[in-house]
Amino acid sequence: MQNNEQVSVLTEGHVCTIVLNCPLHNFVDVALLRALANRLEALDTDTNCRAVVLASEGKVFCAGADSSDVMSDGSFVYSAQLYTQAMRLFRTRKPIVAAVQGAAIGAARGWPSLPTFGLPVRHRALASTSIAWASIPALA
């Protein structure tokens, strides 16, 4: 298993499982998206890996973007960096299946629009925090 603080990878046969581990609710921030994109891009070049399972630790798959760095006008301090990293996810080529437990809110709700994404788990909740759904269709 390869680990960093927020993302770990476990390889079993030809399937690689990427596990998000950002207690308490797996909020998305620039560092998490960068680590996730780096792992997915590395797996794209790994000929042993034929598919990726995206999972997470805890009761919530992902509770959306970390809003702890909000400016006085209500915008995120790192919004451009956040979306730059998020768009890297859409360029990956391996089939991705999510093992969703609990809620997938905001940013994570958009992950099923990745080109090869699937949601196999029965008990899940997808929710958006956007008022205007079309504001950024690929991610929200």
Image (tube, helix red, strand yellow):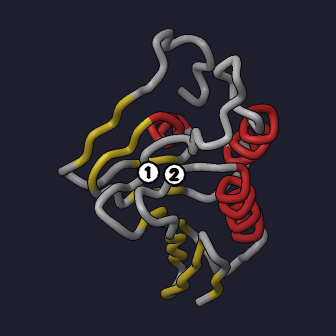
Question: Observer-nearest residue: 2 or 16?
Answer: 2
Q: Amino acid at mark 1?
A: Cys
Q: Which mark is residue 27?
A: 2
Q: Name the residue that disc number 1 marks.
A: 62
Q: Quadrant of the N terminus?
A: bottom right
Q: Is residue 9 above or below residue 26?
A: below
Image position, residue 79 (x, y; %): 74, 33
Image position, residue 83 (x, y; %): 73, 36
- Furthest residue to the left? 123
Residue 68 sits in which quadrant?
top right
Image position, residue 7 (x, y; %): 60, 71
Q: Is residue 37 above or below residue 48?
A: above
Q: In the displayed structure, does residue 32 sit left or right of residue 78?
A: left
Q: Amino acid at mark 2?
A: Phe
Q: Which mark is residue 78?
A: none
Question: Observer-nearest residue: 27 or 86?
Answer: 27
Evaluate if marks 2 and 1 touch, with contact meaning CB atoms under 8 Å apart. yes
